[in-house]
Image: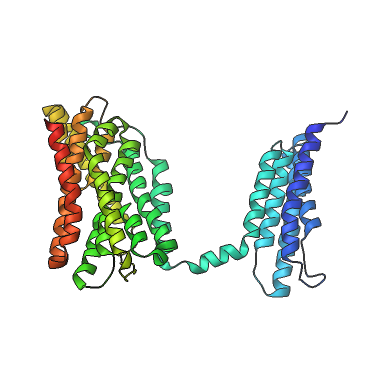
Amino acid sequence: MIDWVIIRGLAAAFAAGLLIGIERGWRLRHGASGSRIAGIRTFTLLAVSGGLIALIVQSLGAIVGAVPLAGLVAVLVMGYARQTRGSGKRDATSFVAALIAVALGLLAGSGQPMVAIAGAALTTLILAAREQSHRFVNRLSRQDIDAFAYYAVIAGGVLPFLPNRRFGPYEAWNPFQLWLVVVLVTGFSFAGYIANRLVGQRKGTLATAVIGGAYSSTAVTASLAQRLRSGEEGPWTAGIAIASAIMYLRVLLLIFVLAGGAFIPVVRVIGPAMIVSFAVALVAWRRSATESGTGQPSLGRNPIQLAPALGFLVAVAGAALLVRWASVSFGERGVAWSLFLAGSFDVDAAIVTLSGLPAGSIAPRLAGLAIGGTVAVNMAFKMAVTGATARRRSGAAVLALGSSLLVLLASLAWELL
């Protein structure tokens, strides 16, 4: 009887080697005759050999299978060494691809044919994207690498190893949740930074306001206010208005993701102000359509910095402790005031703290009032920054910010009645 499981495994090994071999053979097609140590046939045979070795291990044991595997790897190492001495080039791509072909053959022969095919497809894609990947790397700056490395440490080097349970006074701190917030907030920064690198120079102030507003509307406001003060022509007022409108949207998104129970009350409080803010931003942008300035303001250094991320973590942890203490000592009104105080320094910190509260610690209506109050404080601060920086040229920008602030204060007053 035919064992279809064995046939399927060997067929998958054959297909995996063929996929990689086609790409390698095409890549090395211009090499002199006899200079190519691996092509379609070689890679296919390597993968099939891996499949046969897996069958040997299953039938006769690991020690027996290790002998041909060691011999196969030794042949590959000697072939790579010979190629390196002959050509003087140290390109290990084909050598590594050959090892992967053998490994995929082992997977296919061990009963994982679909995994082997998927691995071969991904390997072929990576090999085929040589020119694109080289162009991408050549476009990177040192700042880009730093941003990538910092975010990799924040998201992948720390988070998986943190305990997901509560510690500390009043059990206020959950290390996993606290660091997850840092990953989320710095993720806004990383996404904004990447987008700014891709489209910021071409789209100018609009891209800066939209992207910058996603992670720091205050930074955008300060930067554009400096342009206003210098008297340089450009849609700086519109940029300030757009960044603040995006800030409202960011707050609602964070509330929806982190504290969904308070989403509707927060929408009732800041929703009207957000609508007014977007309307004002649209009017300001249309009025600035004839202005000639389209440059991009500098937003400072790489936004993914470990020290600010750790500072934000400390702020969130302190706010969490303050709110839990207020909850125990003064009830839900104490929680509301502590959220407002925490948010006066950082709106995101107040939202994150709210998300970490036990169910029932604060009524959704009070949570909406507290978050709305923190947004109002933030808007007032940006008005002060704009006025102090741009001085006599700040009138239109202050008016644009003040219009949504007035609506926000009216909504807060209505909810308090």
In what quadrant of the picture does the C terminus appear? Answer: top left
Q: Is residue 296 above or below residue 253?
A: below
Between 33 and 344, which is closer to the camera in this rendering?
Answer: 344
Residue located at (76% from left, 39% from top): 9
Q: Position of residue 40 (x, y in %)?
A: 78, 57
In what quadrant of the picture does the N terminus appear? Answer: top right
Q: Quadrant of residue 365?
A: top left
In the image, is 52 to the left or to the right of 133?
right
Residue located at (24% from left, 59% from top): 221
Residue located at (32% from left, 58% from top): 209
Residue placed farthest to the right in the image?
1
Q: How many marks?
A: 0
Q: Is residue 41 above or below residue 103?
A: below
Q: Is residue 143 above or below residue 62?
A: below
Q: Position of residue 150 (x, y in %)?
A: 39, 56
In the image, is 391 to the left or to the right of 221?
left
Color style of the picture: rainbow
Q: Position of residue 46 (x, y in %)?
A: 77, 52
Q: Quadrant of residue 93?
A: bottom right
Q: Is residue 42 visible?
A: yes
Between 155 and 390, which is closer to the camera in this rendering?
Answer: 390
Between 355 and 370, which is closer to the camera in this rendering?
Answer: 370
Q: Position of residue 78 (x, y in %)?
A: 73, 63
In the image, is 292 to the left or to the right of 20?
left
Q: Is residue 305 visible?
A: no
Q: Quadrant of residue 414?
A: top left
Between 389 and 76, which is closer to the camera in this rendering?
Answer: 389
In the image, is 387 to the left or to the right of 348?
left
Residue located at (27% from left, 46% from top): 248
